[in-house]
Image: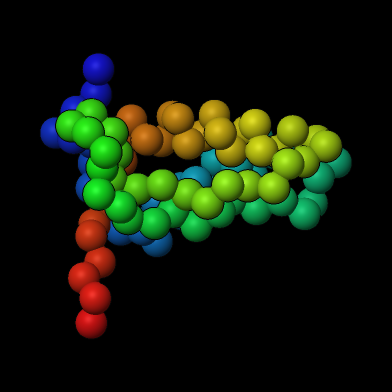
Amino acid sequence: MTNTADRTTISGTQLYAIFDREFKNLRPSACTRCNVPLPYWRNPPDDVSANWHIGTPAECKQGCHLIIAELLARLWTRYDVEQQLAQ
């Protein structure tokens, strides 16, 4: 079980860059339209969940939405994002 102390805290921009790079490495070459949704900060629902989430990706015939779900599960255990305070 992962807790927040086991995660590295990075900016949302850094997380998006990691997510995007990983997705582009795994995305089927037949699909050129799908992109990773932007991650956003949120209060974690419990003590073991990450403090960020992404929007729901569109379903893709090539399976990109499944790749994004797998990446979400993997990156959720590794990273938290810095909370952006309202200006």
| Residue 6 seen in the current view | no
Q: Decide which of 14, 47 is in the foreground and name it.
A: 47
Residue occupying the far bottom of the picture? 87
| Residue 85 seen in the current view | yes
Residue 55 in percent (x, y) is at: 52, 51
Residue occupying the far left of the picture? 5
Residue 50 in percent (x, y) is at: 29, 39
Residue 1 in percent (x, y) is at: 25, 17
- Screen quadrant of the C terminus: bottom left
Tally of numbered tags? 0
Residue 47 sits in which quadrant?
A: top left
* Left or right of residue 53, residue 22 in this image: right
Residue 48 in percent (x, y) is at: 23, 29
* Residue at screen point 25% across, 49% down: 43
* Residue at screen point 32% across, 55% down: 41
* Residue at screen point 30% across, 52% down: 42
Colour theme: rainbow
* Left or right of residue 42, residue 59 in this image: right
* Residue at screen point 23% across, 57% down: 82
* Left or right of residue 76, residue 9 in this image: left
Q: Decide which of 47, 82 is in the foreground and name it.
A: 47
Residue 83 sits in which quadrant?
A: bottom left
